[in-house]
Amino acid sequence: MEEESMEEEGGCEAMMDDQNHNNWGAGGYGRHLLGPAAAPLGDRLLRGAVAGPPTGPELPAVPEANGVLRGCEPGGAAGKGGAGAIAAAININASTSKFLMNVITIEDYKSTYWPKLDSAIDQLLTQSPGDYIPISYEQIYSCVYKCVCQQHSEQMYSDLIKKITNHLERVSKELQASPPDLYIERFNVALGQYMGALQSIVPLFIYMNKFYIETKLNRDLKDDLIKLFTEHVAEKHIYNLMPLLLEAQSTPFQITPSTMANIVKGLYTLRPEWVQMAPALFSKFIPNILPPAVESELQEYAAQDQKLQRELMQNGFTRGDQSRKRAGEELTYNGSSACASSRGYR
């Protein structure tokens, strides 16, 4: 009788262990494999382990319709298999809880994850060149990665576009209130600041760009963000900006050459067709804008150069000494000749 009981216990444990010797009978995985009839099996094991061994006579092992031994639960749960069943149930419950804790709901996204991204984007959009930004790029990238994995890409993209659009609208209003003498400089600052911010924002959202924007929208994040600046800032100010640029071009050094170059190249990047508004201006900073020179127009080119030289002279720029000798060269030559003569005389 004892041998039969041990065989029954061993058979029960064999039924409860998978091929990797993992006890799964008390969890949902065991219920899934054994069918609906074995659903209360884990509960019976837990109750048997807590209540202790039965006081009545041991029931014979009667196989149920699904092949599970009905009479093996008291001894197996109370004895050798009870602790394993409890441990398996705890491990399964812990794993399930851990999985559920990693789920990011839409409320979690709005209350926890997006505020972190919103704050980082604010700092990047308003930083000056060379400023130190006290944010963790690793943490921001991790937030984006988790949100994309939890199917929040569409909401995150919508929030990003809305955030940057609001920022650019404020920038546009500030430019409208600028006086003409500061208009060009402030536009240059706004353009450079925004393009510098994109160099950090686009890499931080690269995972969303790869698995949502490129895949589902067939676009690119950088192109979308550049288009935002074009629509909300540049298009609203191009007709006020261009006359000021042409006026500054006619007055040498009214603005620094670097400022003029940054603005002209930036406008060409935003919308190349704006070249038609001032081809001569764009051709000074961007190659191959004007048609190639032809021999029949060489006299006209020479006349333009002479006109430029006259304008420079009228504004105080002198041509200097046009003799073949450089300034001070005569004195140096005479001094060296005198030394040579004195050495030869001695």
Image (cartoon, rainbow, N blue to C red):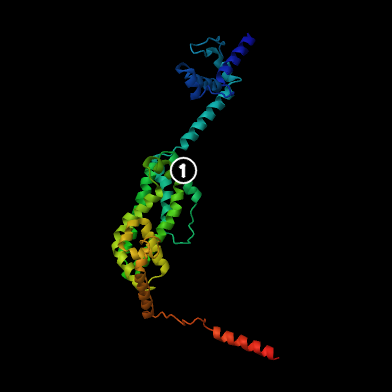
On the image, which quarter does residue 250 sit in? bottom left
Q: For mark 1, what is the residue?
A: 145
Q: Which residue is at the front of the view, 73 or 111?
A: 111
On the image, which quarter does residue 58 sit in? top right
From this viewpoint, which residue is outermost toward the bottom? Answer: 345
Mark 1 burial class by Cα count in 10 Å: few <14, some 14-19, many 20+: some
Query: Label 1 sits on what residue type?
Result: Tyr
Tally the marks: 1
In percent of the image, x 38 and y 80: which residue is there?
A: 313
Give coordinates of residue 104: x percent, y percent: 43, 39
Residue 51 falls left or right of residue 225 = right
Instruction: Report helix, strand or loop for mark 1.
Output: helix
Q: Is residue 90 above or below residue 72?
A: below
Say which quadrant the C terminus sits in: bottom right
In percent of the image, x 31 and y 60: which residue is there?
A: 276
Q: Is residue 268 above or below residue 81?
A: below
Give coordinates of residue 39: x percent, y percent: 47, 19
Give coordinates of residue 238: x percent, y percent: 31, 61
Residue 19 falls left or right of residue 282 = right
In percent of the image, x 35 and y 75: which residue is there?
A: 307
Q: Which residue is at the front of the view, 286 or 235?
A: 286
Is residue 53 in view from this perspective? no
Give coordinates of residue 302: x percent, y percent: 37, 72
Is residue 82 in view from this perspective? yes
In percent of the image, x 36 and y 59: which residue is there?
A: 267
Q: Is residue 289 above or below residue 101?
A: below
